[in-house]
Image (cartoon, rainbow, N blue to C red):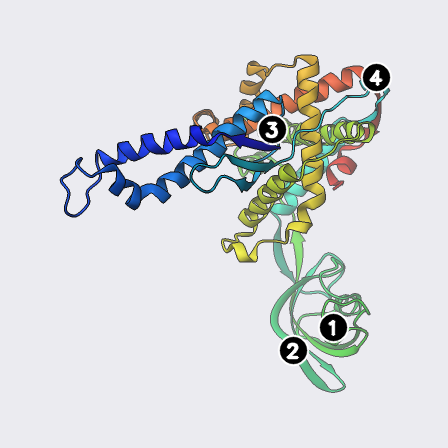
Amino acid sequence: MTIRVPSEEIEREVEARLQKVGRTARLKGFRPGKVPLKVVRKHYGAQVRQEVLSDVIRVSYSRAVQQAQLNPAGGPQIEPLTGLTEGEDFSFRATFEVFPEIKLNDLEKLEIARPRVEITEADVDAMLEKLREQRAEWRTVERPASKGDRVVVDFVGRIDGEPFQGSESQEVRIVVGAGQVLEDFDRALEGLSAGETRTAKVQFPADYPREDLRGKQADFEIKAHRVEEKVLPEVDAEFAKAFGVEEGGVEKLRVEVRANMQRELDEKLRAETKTRTFDALLAANEVTTPRALVSQEIRHLQADAMSRLGITDPAKAPPAEHFEAAARRRVAVGLLVQELIRAHGIELDRARVQRRVDELVAPFENPEEAARLYRTSRELMSQVEASVLEDQVVETILERAKVTDEPRSFEEFMAAG
């Protein structure tokens, strides 16, 4: 877009500003407010003109965009063309992207497979077993090690009779058969007794992380200090108390475990259903993604990644290209969601926002305090509101699309990436 501003408009504004500056200017040899306009122009003319041109660009660009009924996506690149000298009309070129016009295809044609998962008593039993594993203790035994036992060993490895970097260690705890060490080393631990020394030939695989060891064979001398077996606690009232259940014993613990499982399941079902729904929406609607919005989204994703990784030096930020595909998807989904909200008159359900906050704070030790922190943080509440509005959009799509249920087991579904 090329925009022209008459020189009279610019000179009138420059003159007015110079007069205003003259009323407060302090120059040597003149009393405050008594500096001649000619002297003010000599000292401040170039600066004032630059300020006026900056304001003229901002105001005239905004006015031109409104008159042309355009919707810019990001700020413009400004290229002055003429008018940098006094008495000349000022014109400049503004180059910018606009939001694409989106025409949604029929939602009725979308096909979406929605996961359906029910928590069974067997799932609760399996979760209690995991909790038992978390509270397991190791007890020394006077017998050879078998799978599932833990052995405490010293070892030293040699290749062609020579030790290598990282080949020696003491008092290492290894669970037999758990895949913590290479298969040949693991196999040598089975049947090992306290005080016994054994030599194992260990073959490093061709894809071993350390390049200097790939495909090589080493001899490891392994000395066992002790053999320990895993002792799991009984699932009883004392076990329940260890997880904060003071009254109600095992039955109350099962109720709370199931409730926690259900919360985690609901969260993953919500996320997975949303992903599948938006995937179907993207497949059915072609969207042009403005580069300005994609670049902005890449910066957000980079900042999130840096925060998670504890990186503070911008020079060490993960490369922008790593986030390109995810950023384009986010922008495209965002544009489609906004059009759906407009086309279907979807308004944010405030009651659902409050319920969502309650769900989010339920796992906290003090839910009421956590809820208060949420509701007093504009940033956190904006995130919750955006999530709820997306949920409402997803429901609008699911009400109209061809939806089939996909039964999945709890274990399978929760283990899936």
SS for dot 4: helix
Label 4 to label 1, Cα distance in Å?
Answer: 54 Å
SS for dot 3: helix
Residue type at numbered disc 3 = Glu
State the quadrant of the C terminus: top right
Q: Tell me which label, 4 or 2, sits earlier in the chain.
A: 4
Give whichever of 39, 79 is nearer the camera.
39
Residue type at numbered disc 4 = Glu
Image location of residue 60, percent across then percent down:
51, 28
The image quarter in which residue 400 lies = top right
Q: Tell me which label, 3 or 2, sits earlier in the chain.
A: 2
Give whichever of 176, 343 is nearer the camera.
343
Image location of residue 91, percent across then percent down:
54, 36
Q: Tell me which label, 2 or 1, sits earlier in the chain.
A: 2
Please tell me whether residue 13 is drawn above or below residue 352 in the rendered image. Answer: below
Give whichever of 398, 346 is nearer the camera.
346
Residue at 65% of width from left, 70% of height from top?
153
Label 4 to label 2, Cα distance in Å?
Answer: 63 Å
Binning the other alpha carbons within 10 Å of mark 4 as few (below 14), some (14 to 19) or many (20 upward) gives few
Say which residue label 2 marks: 165
SS for dot 2: strand
